[in-house]
Image (cartoon, grey):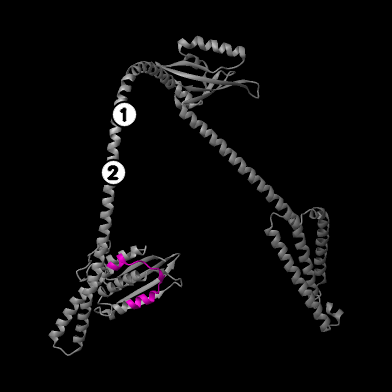
């Protein structure tokens, strides 16, 4: 009989149980899926089987709730009882398993304990790293000392050895091999002790035996100096030894051997020199009296030399004064010449400007075409003369005008230059734009900047490309304490081979130019007076860019 009869098939009771059991079953299944996921992913967890039991237990509970929903309409009580028995077994197994591992679970550290353990572990690791650094530093210093010792041994030709008396052999460094004429590639290999006795010079054998006998009596090893015979070459050596007892109670001797052959040779040479010096001293004493007599004569000569030196110093002083006076006069003449050039330029420019004005007025009147052509030619020649005079005048201003630091209005300078260049042929065909990218105030010499701007703008007019719409862009920016001013046009450009020469006096890069060749030279002089620098980039038929770096 369906379980719904128990609820009298009342919809409220029936559906409340059905929905609740369904939601519980879904929740149980989700929990089981999550536990299975944990079981699969956490392979390092020591109690995975407990997680598996919990997943089985909770999934069984979910199945019983599913049958509670089904039994409302279809009575599958036998199958339901089977799953309930499975659920009971899984529940008891999980309970017993949990009871068994509860003490172990209680020992699992909390998050706070884990953090404390991690902190202690980090501190311990930090201490280990510090100790490791100290050990590395100590090893580095030790290796450095060893390298220094080896280097010192190489420089001083000092060899070292170790004698094992029980085994009857010696091990030696390359320096000792070199002293005793042994192959260097065998350094560090055992050498029979008797080899070193065989190399002792025959005349020094008795000396060595006596010294060794004394050492056995006094229980001290002396410092020995003797000769050895390597083939036919005699060498002088000094040996210092130290005997120790190792941890096994065995006697081991450590020592150093120094080759003093050159020192001995130097001593013999010094002895011979001393004998020669004694002979020379006798001869020197014999000539001392002669020198004393000569000294008196030299004293007289020195007095005369002092008089000559005073006279020479007086002449040098007079000559220096004359040169200073001449230099001052030359400077005054140069200043007068500069003033003359400045005045002449002004005097010449005045009538030239008047002629240009008259020609302009004549062109406005009705004249025959030939007269107009003549007037244009006259205007061009006079304009060229005026341009040259302006260049000379600007050069004079650059050399003689005192620099004044005033706030610079770059847009105003550009406007003034364009106003002064309106008489230039085709000046109106050049589109000039100004872009100020810095709000910082530049303090500089307005006069020299005006000359620089005017010359570059006039060049952009003269050498514009007649086949494109001509333009010149002037941009001002700053980088740190420097202002960067770019003049970019789309004119005819400059040949690469001429770029290094364009700042020379009277140089013209193209036959199309009828200028004076002074413009960019004057620009260079002005930039140097401003303590700046200028670069140029150009490409033929593309345009030219002048970059001015100006400290402000």
Q: Is residue 229 left or right of residue 253?
A: left
In this picture, is 499 found above or below 245? below
Q: Is residue 359 left or right of residue 60?
A: left
Q: CA distance from mark 2 to mark 1?
A: 23 Å
Q: Which mark is residue 191?
A: none
Q: Position of residue 3 (x, y in %)?
A: 84, 77
In this picture, is 397 found above or below 355? above
Q: Position of residue 52 (x, y in %)?
A: 74, 59
> Alpha-carbon neighbours of circle 1 within 10 Å: few (<14), some, or many (≥20)?
few
Q: Residue at x 84, y 84 (%)?
A: 10
Per the image, the residue denoted by label 2 is: 314
Quarter of the view holding residue 530: bottom left
Q: Secondary structure at mark 1?
A: helix
Q: Are marks 2 and 1 in contact (CB under 8 Å)?
A: no
Quarter of the view holding residue 294: top left
Q: Residue at x 75, y 63 (%)?
A: 55
Residue 476 in the magenta stretch? The answer is no
> Alpha-carbon neighbours of circle 2 within 10 Å: few (<14), some, or many (≥20)?
few
Q: Position of residue 511 (x, y in %)?
A: 19, 69
Q: Split into 4 quadrants, where in the image is the C terminus?
A: bottom left
Q: Position of residue 513 (x, y in %)?
A: 21, 71
Q: Is residue 155 left or right of residue 29?
A: left
- In the image, 314 versus 266, the foreground residue is 314
**Comes first in the chain, label 2 or label 1:** 1
Q: Is residue 41 visible?
A: yes
Q: Secondary structure at mark 2?
A: helix
- In the image, 103 versus 86, the foreground residue is 103
Residue 401 in the magenta stretch? The answer is yes
Q: What span is in magenta?
A: 396-416
Q: Residue at x 63, y 23 (%)?
A: 246
Per the image, the residue denoted by label 1 is: 299
């Amino acid at each position: 009989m369906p379980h719904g009869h128990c609820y009298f098939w009342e919809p409220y009771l029936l559906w409340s149980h059905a929905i609740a059991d369904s939601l519980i079953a879904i929740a149980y299944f989700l929990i089981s899926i999550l536990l299975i996921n944990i079981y699969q992913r956490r392979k390092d967890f020591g109690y995975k089987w407990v997680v598996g039991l919990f997943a089985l237990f909770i999934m069984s509970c979910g199945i019983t709730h599913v049958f509670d929903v089904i039994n409302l309409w279809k009575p599958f009580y036998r199958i339901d009882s089977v799953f309930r028995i499975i659920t009971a077994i899984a529940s008891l197994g999980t309970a017993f398993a949990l009871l068994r591992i509860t003490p172990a679970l209680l020992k699992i550290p909390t998050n706070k304990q884990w953090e404390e353990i991690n902190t202690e572990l980090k501190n311990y690791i930090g201490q280990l790293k510090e100790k490791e650094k100290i050990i590395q530093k100590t090893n580095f210093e030790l290796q450095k000392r060893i390298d220094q010792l080896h280097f010192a041994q190489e420089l001083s030709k000092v060899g070292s050895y170790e004698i094992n008396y029980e085994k009857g052999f010696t091990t030696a460094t390359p320096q000792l091999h070199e002293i005793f004429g042994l192959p260097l590639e065998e350094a560090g290999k055992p050498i029979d002790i008797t080899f070193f006795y065989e190399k002792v010079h025959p005349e020094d054998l008795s000396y060595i035996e006596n010294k060794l006998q004394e050492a056995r009596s006094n229980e001290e090893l002396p410092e020995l100096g003797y000769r050895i015979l390597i083939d036919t070459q005699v060498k002088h050596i000094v040996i210092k030894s130290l005997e120790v007892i190792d941890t096994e109670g065995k006697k081991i001797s450590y020592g150093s051997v120094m080759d003093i052959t050159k020192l001995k040779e130097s001593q013999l040479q010094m002895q011979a020199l001393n004998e020669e010096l004694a002979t020379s001293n006798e001869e020197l004493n014999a000539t001392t009296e002669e020198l004393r007599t000569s000294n008196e004569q030299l004293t007289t000569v020195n007095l005369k030399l002092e008089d000559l030196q005073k006279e020479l110093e007086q002449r040098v002083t007079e000559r220096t004064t004359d040169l200073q006076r001449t230099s001052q006069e030359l400077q005054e003449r140069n200043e007068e010449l500069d003033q003359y050039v400045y005045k002449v330029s002004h005097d010449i420019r005045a009538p030239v400007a008047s002629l240009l004005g008259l020609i302009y007025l004549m062109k406005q009147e009705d004249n025959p075409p030939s007269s107009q052509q003549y007037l244009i030619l006259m205007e061009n020649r006079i304009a060229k003369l005026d341009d040259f005079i302006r260049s000379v005048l600007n050069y004079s201003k650059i050399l003689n005008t005192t620099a004044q630091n005033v706030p610079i209005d770059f847009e105003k300078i550009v406007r003034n230059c364009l106003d002064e260049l309106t008489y230039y042929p085709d000046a109106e065909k050049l589109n000039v734009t100004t872009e100020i990218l810095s709000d910082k105030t530049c303090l500089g010499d307005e006069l020299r900047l005006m000359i620089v701007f005017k010359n570059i703008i006039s060049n952009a007019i003269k050498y514009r490309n007649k086949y494109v719409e001509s333009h010149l862009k002037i941009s001002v920016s700053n980088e740190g304490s420097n202002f960067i001013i770019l003049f970019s046009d789309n004119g005819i450009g400059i040949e690469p081979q001429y770029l290094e020469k364009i700042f020379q006096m009277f140089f013209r890069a193209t036959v199309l130019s009828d200028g004076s060749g002074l413009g960019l030279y004057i620009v260079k002089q002005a930039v140097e007076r401003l303590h700046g620098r200028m670069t140029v980039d150009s490409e033929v038929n593309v345009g030219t860019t002048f970059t001015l770096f100006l400290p402000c």
